[in-house]
Image: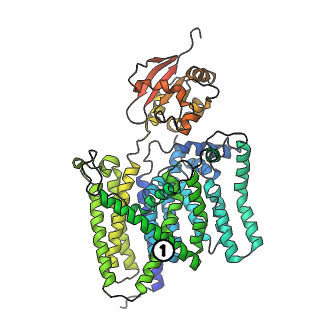
Amino acid sequence: MQVPVIEPDRNQRLAEYAAVGLLVILGFIYSLHFLGHFVFPNPDFVAFLQIGQQWLSFRIPYTMKRAPLFTLITVLVGNFFSTPDRNLFGTELYNAIMLPTVMVLIYLIGRKFLGKAALWVALLACISPWMVRMSSQPLAELTLVALFAATCLCIRSHIKWAYLFAMLGSIARWDMAGLIPAVALVDLIRNRKWPRTIMMTALASIPFGICMIITWMQLRGQAEGAHYIQVLSKDRTFELAADLGFYWHNICSFFNAQLLQSSPSGQVRSFEALNSAVSTVTGLLLGAAFLAGCVTAVIKKRWEIIVMLLAGVPYVMIHAIYPYRLSRFCVPAAWAGLIIAAYGLVTFWRWFVSKPKPKFLIPVLQLIAAIIFVLWAVRIAGILWASKNTGTLTYAQNRCPLISQLTLISVLVVVAGFFVLQLLRRQKPSMGWLIVPTFLVLAVVSNAATTGFLMGDGQSNANFKRLGLWFLENAEDDDRMITTMPGWLPIYTGLPIERFDHTGNILPRDAKDFPAFIQGCGKRNVTLIAWDSRLAGAPNDRYYKLWGLDRIQALGAPFLGRKADRIGPCQLIHIISEGSPKIAIYRILPAPGN
């Protein structure tokens, strides 16, 4: 009986499906491991949710700091659930789904000019520590990555869709507005159809333009505030080197986990010089590869990469001007930096392989690299799973217990996936069957070491949830609490937002000291004050000043060793002292005769 032969093109299709399946599986392994990981996620979520609710009520929001697209997502995804935290859980689940989606998009972009390496570049981009963290936070970063990648994917063959995704990006967060002129410029260079380009650009710009008009009307005559435009107009800076450092750490995370951490006593320092050398070398290689990729892309008219540059450069520059340096801001563009650098490396490698050389040279280089990768991975794994008695900083046991299981599963899936793909492609065994798996193991372990430290145990600021549960169990029916995090308490308790007020709503210019603040509480029917330590030690923080937290600093007395049963008309009734932040709850006593 003759065995049917599988056609080469069918093999290729099976390999493509398997590659996509591998990325989807890995994406869900990472994102679902950390679904709901943070008891108290990023505080910005409440602002997104409240503004989205106003849009869906056909009201212009009180502030245009948050672009509308993601705010609407936070509200709409909550409709699929019925618990008090339905919007929070829905948004976290949405971002968990977005991680494998982004992996696939990056792969589809890269396979056009990276070939088989595109699969591993997509994997490296999306298991980086900050990408994993954003997949478990209810924030807009992964939506920005998805829209940026979709724009680049469509730029060559589906230009109308590229305009659509660029438009959506511009109203997902304002710093992504550069996608629209980037698409327009590439469209004009390629097709030279001025009328169509102008029309499409104008249509794509309408939502962003309307939002900017509303913003201008809201901010007229307001010098102070937390809107990005107000911050930039008052406190702008230019720290490009600091921002590029964030990109370097993010992109090179699969190399840069420290080979040996210093102990608390500072006794273990033998690898500090090596750590510094590794960081320097990877930084130089990344910069050289990125520049090579940029030049090659322009010469060969790789329009996907050209759009990345046209949109990515202004994005990076805007955040270099923004006075607050946040690593998460690099996530929407870091993947593009990695794919451009990978293109530079792949181009160099193809040129190097094509040159005459001794036959044994490449196999020897690959063997040496594989040995280095194995030793490197073993060293980092020793830190990742170090025992508590070593005195070193242990990620798996002291920081994030989930990371051990995640690392083992990911290593097994990645290595097995590689060999399955090789078999589907009917590749002959070679040194590549050794060097690629060893490199992937190193990448997974190195990223895991940094991810474990970054994710922690998810308990940071968890006391705000305990505050909500205390209120639910102990507050009287007519109690109203003022706190710095009022939007989170309805999420934790299911109570109406009207039961809670924001400290900053009693404006510092109207109530300049503690007695005036208490009077303001009376006017707003506030009966309980929750003082928290989250910003207590940061008097120069913008929000500390905007909310006038100096007026109530005396309420932190219980945590300063002072007698604090009664401070003015405020009676201390409860303390939450374990975990973070420290919280003291006071009841405002009625004035004598009332």
* Amino acid type shown at disc 1: Gly
Q: Residue at x 34, y 82 (%)?
A: 362
Q: Residue at x 27, y 66 (%)?
A: 375
Q: Position of residue 192 (x, y in %)?
A: 72, 76
Horizontal side of 163 relative to 152 (left or right) equals right
Horizontal side of 407 relative to 247 (left or right) equals left
- Which residue is outermost to the top? 593
Above-or-below relation of 8 to 498: below
Q: Position of residue 258 (x, y in %)?
A: 33, 57
Above-or-below relation of 441 to 398: below
Above-or-below relation of 291 to 142: below
User: Would residue 91 be seen by someone viewing this image from the given angle?
Assistant: yes
Pick the front one: 22 or 583: 583
Q: Quadrant of the N terminus?
A: bottom left
Q: Secondary structure under badge 1? A: helix
- Which residue is outermost to the right? 195
> Which residue matches tag 1?
344
